[in-house]
Image (cartoon, grey):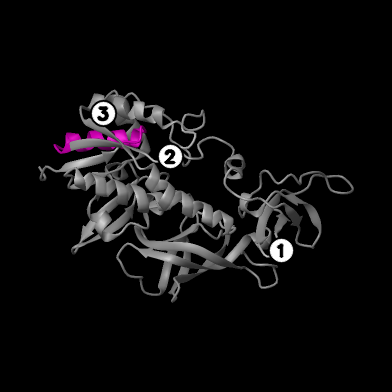
Amino acid sequence: MARRHRIVVGLSGGVDSAVTAWLLKQQGHEVVGIFMKNWEDDDDSDYCSSNVDFVDAAAVADVIGIEIEHVNFAADYKDRVFAEFLREYQAGRTPNPDVLCNAEIKFKAFLDHALRLGAEKIATGHYARVRERAGSFELLKGLDPAKDQSYFLHRLSQAQLAKSLFPVGELKKTEVRRIAAEIGLPNAKKKDSTGICFIGERPFREFLNRYLNHVPGPMIDDRGHEVGRHVGLSFYTLGQRQGLGIGGVKAGGGQHAPWYVARKELDRNVLRVVQGHDHPWLLSAALSADDVSWVAGTAPDAGRMAAKTRYRQSDAPCAFRPTPQGFELDFDLPQWAVTPGQSAVLYDGEICLGGGVIAGARASSPTTGPQAS
């Protein structure tokens, strides 16, 4: 058997982290569970109660036979993740707090805490893999393509990956649920969490309303006609279809094609909207990114790669060019609703190389109107 380690597992209350802890204990390691509390504001509401998740995590620890500690990272989260989240929204971009949370909380504050407890490694229930090769560490996609979460982990460094284990990354989700049921875990059938806890199931706009200024303004279509009013640019994201309030019928009868958010013009407080999923304004041939992070510690060479501009999309073949600010990508096929603030993540086959924050996009045709802000 491989050497026995003291491993601290982040137990979220979900099935993936529960099976992670069980697998490591089966391998003979000394396993300790940590439950991370990352949000305190209105945490006793119906929308997002970490108390319920902690009860589930504690029940799992009891069944597996490991200790569990409740640790509060809410102050770190507010300073390092939530403040940046609000800054990005106020600047008209759409950030991805899960990416930032992994880099700043789960693999920084949590890792530091685990090391203070004498841990040699930490483990989480992410669907990804780590491979050591020639003294350096590679981040690989999880083996279940429907669950791969390497996109959210692309900002992890060599030092963080060296200390991290992702046991369920080697399994399909169906296998994880089968194991959970087989060993009698109380959360074997618990549904997967669908969002960041500080928002929970509450309406997104209602939540942002409490933190962001909102200045209403016009919604203008691709012909320059005002077709409605927006409640504040921060409350919309590119490609958004729901909640625009500009449905209806065409003059002469017949249904409108659906409306989509295409651009934000911050200087004029204008929201540009278009009709039809494949409108040219929604398609981008290229993007630029900054605030980059590379798993290997240095940028890859210019060349052919694949990229994701949002989670749950297929890898898109592209040409990669490093720039002084970050990098540029030219796609083989136009990409839909490339959104400033989201992450563009680079892949070489199953290897996640890292990525950056999308700064801007170039439309498929130079005559297709204003660019993404």
Image coordinates for residue 207, horizontal then vertical, percent: 57, 41
The vertical placement of 323 against 53, above or below, is below
Local secondary structure at mark 1: loop
Of the numbered discs 2 and 3, the one sitting upstream in the chain is 2
Q: Quickly name the residue at label 1.
A: 268
Q: Quickly name the residue at label 3.
A: 61
Q: Quickly name the residue at label 2.
A: 39
Disc 1 to disc 2, C-alpha distance: 35 Å
Residue nearer the viewer, 137 or 325 = 325
User: Which image quadrant: the N terminus?
Assistant: top left
Local secondary structure at mark 2: loop
Q: Amino acid at mark 3?
A: Ala
Provide the residue span drawn in magenta. Answer: 11-30
Local secondary structure at mark 3: helix
Crowd around label 3: few <14 · some 14–19 · many ≥20 (10 Å): many
Q: Is residue 285 visible?
A: yes
User: Which mark is nearer the camera, 2 or 3?
Assistant: 2
Residue nearer the viewer, 223 or 212 = 212
Disc 1 to disc 3, C-alpha distance: 54 Å
The residue sitting at 30% across, 24% down in the picture is 59
